[in-house]
Amino acid sequence: SKMSRMSAKAILQIVSKEFLSFVNDLSEEEMISVEPIERFKELYITWRDHFSEMDERYKSVTDGRIINFLVQEGSLIRHHDKALILTINPQGVPARKTFWNEKLGLNREALEANKGDIEISAVSFEGEIAVTGEVVSRNVIIRNNSATVARSLTQIDISAIEFTILLPKGGDSGISSAKLPLLLYPMTEKSFTIQCCAQDVGVVNGHIRFNFESFSISRFVSLQCGNADLMNQFKPIEKYEKSKRKDLRFFRQIEDGVRPAGPGKSNTYKAPAQFPVIQELRTKESLGEAVELVQAERAALQPGNYVGLFQLLLWLEEITIAKDMLRYNAEGVQLNCDSKREFISLVVPGLAESRPSVMVGDDILVQESNGSGPPERCFKGYAHIIVDSTVYFKFSQNFHITFDPNTLYDVQFNFKRTLLRVFHQALHRIEERNADFNNWLFPSLQSFRLLPALVTSTSAALKNKQLNEYQLLAVKNIVHATGRQVPYIIFGPPGTGKTFTMVEAILKIGKLRPQSKILICAPSNSAVNVLFQRLSEKLSSLEMFRYVAYHRSSKEIIDLSSTKNLLDYCNYNANQNGFDFPGLEKFLKYKYVLATCAVAGQL
């Protein structure tokens, strides 16, 4: 049939125009509600499902392609999360009257364009730094260039309370339209005053929309507020430009370098599986369709799709990290070597801020910039030492011998997947033992029941005068463990003693339950070190063990030490001046073991 021979583009045009027609037929009441974004999403899904039922082939046209098509046509404005859209009639009448705090994206030029013979002058506070609390003003001229048609300014919308509009002949409009509508006769103009009075230091952004009978024209304004002298001292010396992603190169011949001494072999440690990214997901992400996958999985989070959702999120995070790493690839870079040619060093700007993040054991690929060598061949180097912004690598012996410091190189940073593989491994374990984890991940009142206390007669042991009433109650509940089939969560704003309460609970469990073994984890090394420092004041190196990843610097632990040598608590090997990987039997010797969540995944 004729329909079966239609191209994908033709189907896309039909679907998109049908949707636009559907939106334009909606009443104002249908478009405006307490939660307009959610209401719009609901309407969109209803229409999509109905339209797909009419013809199966329309299901091949994704939401993302419909939105992209209509954005290009100028009929829609993409909303900030790329999954929802904000409608606007092609002739300009807004379908939604409230637009406060919306992040409008691709069609800003269309919003600012003059229309219907109405010309609005540009508004700029550029270069001016306002003192907080003082009023700064700018005039804006609205001119009707038509020789015959009068235009009526019906309403002025302002997205920020710091901005107000003074109408001609006085009258403060603010966000209301008390002095409107205002008639602009042919070939006449009116002068309005935009005022800004900011109370806080920083940048104030505003979106001002002038609404006429059948169209609207926007102006975006921005003003810096604060101490002018101070802001001038700290102003940037050049305009910030986000580094562009370089193309990822693929080499047929890679001459491997020398890896740093690792933690050594251990019978108790098994490297996690690879869990590679599914190629179909890479394709969907490149087409902008990954958001729909996440929303579908997240819509009804439950034990059955918990693992699938977080695997999907981990893979999408990996794709994003790998793309971001391309920004740090550099061309025409100078490398240096020490007098013994033992290390090849590279200065990495932004290393202190982890942009990129480079750790001992990470690798880079380098190739001569002038192209004198084979284009498909490169050298791989491994990071051995990191000092401030300088990384010291070891390449192959051949590269070190023939290295010429006057030669420039192209550098490609690689993304290390080890940590994400550990996360995938954790999800895999949950999938294997789903019944064991359900109460922890999805606790419910129906399945919850109080169990006998693991410790009795604790009141004397818990009379710590440094604990307030709520901290003491938290410690008691943790030690008694009557609700031990679900996690116990301590929460509160900064400075309320969460860490202090945790330390007290750990010490009391160890004292009142002598046979217990306590694994203490935190997401970052800095958080673990805070607990480590507090606990070391009460515990000896015979009781407590701080497991440190082999690529960390010993200086990190030395800097924590005050009266004690905290390296004695760690898996520190003085002969290697680094951290090794102890066997499981060493961990079992201690009552208290501290580690980051990622490193604990290796146990």
Image (cartoon, grey):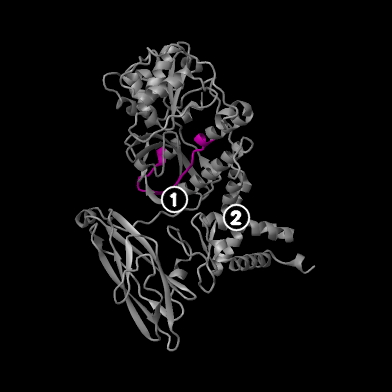
Q: Nearer the viewer, residue 385 or 350?
A: 350
Q: Which residues are magenta?
A: 400-420
Q: Amino acid at mark 2?
A: Glu
Nearest to N terminus: mark 1 or mark 2: 2
Mark 2 secondary-structure assignment: helix
Q: Which residue corresponds to the image point at 39% horizontal and 12% vertical from the top-left?
A: 542
Q: Is residue 42 magenta?
A: no
The residue where tag 1 is placed is: 327
In this view, which residue lies farthest toward the left? 229
Q: Nearer the viewer, residue 112 or 274?
A: 112
* Left or right: 137 as drawn, with respect to 30: left
Q: Amino acid at mark 1?
A: Arg
In this view, which residue lies farthest toward the right? 1
Q: Is residue 457 visible?
A: yes
Q: Position of residue 179 (x, y in %)?
A: 36, 73
* Left or right: 228 as drawn, with respect to 161: left
Quote the CA–CA distance across marks 1 and 2: 38 Å
Q: For the residue carrying disc 1, how many other residues have a C-alpha within 10 Å: few (<14), some (14-19), or many (20+)?
A: some
* Left or right: 556 as drawn, with respect to 100: left
Give the quadrant of residue 221.
Answer: bottom left
Q: Quadrant of the N terminus?
A: bottom right
